[in-house]
Amino acid sequence: MTFVVRPLAEKAQNVTPAVPEEARFYRQISSHLAIAPPVSIVIPAMNEAENLPYVFKSLPGWIHEVVLVDGNSTDDTIAVARELWPDVKVVPQRGQGKGDALTSGFAACTGEIVVMVDADGSADGAEIVSYVSALVAGADFAKGSRFANGGGTDDMTPVRKLGNRVLTSLVNRKFGARYTDLCYGYNAFWRYCLDDIDLDCAGFEVETLMNIRVVRAGLRVQEIPSHEYERIHGTSNLRAVRDGLRVLRVILREHGGKRHKAPAAVPGATPREGS
């Protein structure tokens, strides 16, 4: 399968250009860009009925599908999701934790590109075009960063910022990465990357595990500046100390494990063929 990015032709005044047969397979994602690969959005959610209207409102209409992974919600999360996005694919979570939810969601995706979006309203869906553009331009994994130039956060406490900075530096040193952010859940990737990521953790440390394994696998990573907003309603299940220790354990475990051989970087490389 070949992935193509195609600029949209500008319409001449009073002239309606002929539309090639192949153009019918392209989805417009901006005024100047159209893509062929279908894009799946994965949203892990538990009791997020109040936040979902903000999340779904920001999603672009050109996406292929929305996969909502419900973590046994006791509110109207599923009903609200179906009202807001009638074609939403609801996947019941069998286990517990964000990592488990994402694993279930990834397995249900049919798109060639997968985008992870939190259900608390902290992510701006308008940024998805930047992630997708990076992927069709040649990256394997588009990693959101609140600390790259142009990014930001309204949600992190000083303690969490310090912990994230320390853990990011540790991963960079141990695995040869060049990340500016580590524990952030807004990411996108070609679905074939799942073969290399091979998730096997249940909690919030899932983002760290993904970031480590894409580096170990030699995948091409591009950071995307992203702004994280405050959770709109409710309280986060994240606990800085508890989850920080889980992240640290993942780092130590991965560093002690057998490394994948990373291939040499090839400037201008294009994504591998999808499965």
Image: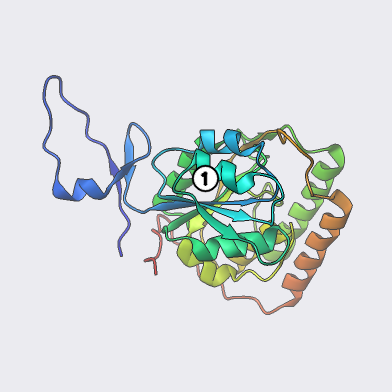
Q: Secondary structure at mark 1?
A: helix
Label 1 packing within 10 angstroms: few (<14), some (14-19), many (20+): some
Q: Residue furthest top?
A: 13
Is 62 displayed left or right of 171 in the figure?
left
Determine whether 41 is above or below 274 in the image: above
Residue 10, quarter of picture: top left
Determine whether 209 is above or below 131 in the image: below
**Nearer to me, 142 or 194:** 194
Judging by the rendered image, the residue that carries numbered circle 1 is 82
- On the question of residue 142 being in view, the answer is no
Q: Position of residue 162 (x, y in %)?
A: 83, 44
Q: Position of residue 111 (x, y in %)?
A: 42, 57
Q: Position of residue 152 (x, y in %)?
A: 67, 34
Q: Looking at the figure, which quarter contains the N terminus?
A: bottom left
Is 246 displayed left or right of 98 in the figure?
right
**Nearer to me, 126 or 48:** 48
How many numbered marks does the figure carry? 1
Q: Position of residue 235 (x, y in %)?
A: 79, 41
Is 172 displayed left or right of 84 in the figure?
right
Is 69 displayed left or right of 61 in the figure?
right
Residue found 14% across the figure and 45% down from its top: 20
- On the question of residue 43 being in view, the answer is yes
Residue 254, quarter of picture: bottom right
Q: Looking at the figure, which quarter contains the C terminus?
A: bottom left
Residue found 64% across the figure and 53% down from its top: 178
Q: Amino acid at mark 1?
A: Arg
